[in-house]
Image: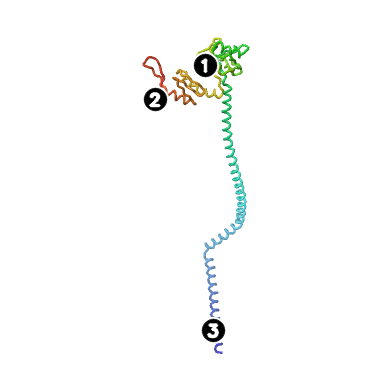
Amino acid sequence: MGCIGGLQTAQTNNLDKYTVQMKTAGTERNKSASAMKASESGDPLRQEIMEAIQALRSNIEPKRDTVTIDVNLFRVDLCKVMDKVTTAEHKINGLQAVTKRLENQVQELMKQHEAAAAKLEDQEGRACHNNIRITGVPEETEGCSAELSTEDLALNKLCPKRLSNYFTIERVHRVPASPPPVGAPPRTIINRAFNFRDRDAILQTARTRGDLKWDDAIVCFFPGFTLQVQRQRRHFKKVKRTLWAKDIKYIPARLRVVEDGRSWLFQSPEEAWDYLEGCRTVDQGGSGAWERQRMPGK
């Protein structure tokens, strides 16, 4: 019985202690809450800050949903744009490959075109090989047959002994086709010899003989050239004038200069000018006999 009484006494003491602690904690909580309320009611600045925060939250909450929706829509549009950019990149890569292939084809076609143009120019030059250009023949003096009139000029007035027995002129025409105005120089006559040896004999005789007259008009003979060769000849016009003034023979259209038994072949007027600038004319012993000499280093 004594043990049981002691156990009950201990339980009663513990219960009293717990009750006291709970009362003390409740009292402290009440004190802290009262103190907080007192402090809040006693600090107007803090209260204003809290009210401003609450107002800001109330304003942000509705707009946050709108911003979220807009961001989601932007993400969808961005994904579409990225898909289009990816598709465009694939197309551009394909176009670059096609463009590269076309560039290679164009370069190959240009090479073929240049080769074909060179071949055509060569064929045209061969077709004009027997042509002779005659300048200075007055208009309307050929008579009824321009071919017979040109043959008579070559046979009887130019070189009657150097032409073959088969010499004949196949075709004759003037260029340009339209008659010149009154007072203008006569048009050039283009004729084609049947034999190229007769053509060369006529040109060589015309070079060595000098001026030939037809009805008091000076007639000159020149080889026939294609349009491309004539354009190349025009590039050497100034150089040829200088060579002519210095009594130096030349052969166009790639300028071939013959001097003292030696010959030089020039592809451009610049090369010909370099040749002329590398020469000088000196008087041998003051006798008036002029001789051309190459300058050192030229």
Residue 158 showing in the rendered view: no
Other-residue count near label 2 (Cα within 10 Å), few / some / many at <14 / 14–19 / ≥20: few
- Spot the residue most to the front: 165
Q: Residue furthest left?
A: 285
Mark 1: secondary structure: helix
Q: Amino acid at mark 3?
A: Ala
Q: CA distance from mark 1 to mark 3?
A: 156 Å
| Mark sitting on residue 10 | 3
Taking the spot 54% from the left edge, 84% from the top edge, the residue there is 10
Q: Residue 115 location in percent, x, y?
A: 57, 30
Do the numbered discs 2 and 1 sit on residues whose CB atoms are within 8 Å? no
Residue at the disc numbered 2: 296
In the image, what residue type sits under mark 2? Pro
Residue 46: assigned label: none
Q: Residue furthest bottom?
A: 1
* Amino acid type of the residue that numbered disc 1 sits on in the rendered structure: Gln
Residue underneath mark 1: 204
Q: Secondary structure at mark 2?
A: loop
Is 114 on the left-hand or right-hand side of 273? Answer: right
Residue 199 quadrant: top right
In the image, residue 269 above or below residue 287: below
Earlier residue among tags 1 and 3: 3
**Does 290 sit left or right of 227 as displayed?**
left
Mark 1 or 3, which is nearer the eye?
1
User: Picture coordinates of residue 155 (x, y %)?
Assistant: 56, 12
Q: Separation of disc 2 and disc 1 at Cα?
A: 35 Å
Residue 11 percent coordinates (x, y): 55, 83
**Residue under the point 38% across and 14% down:** 287
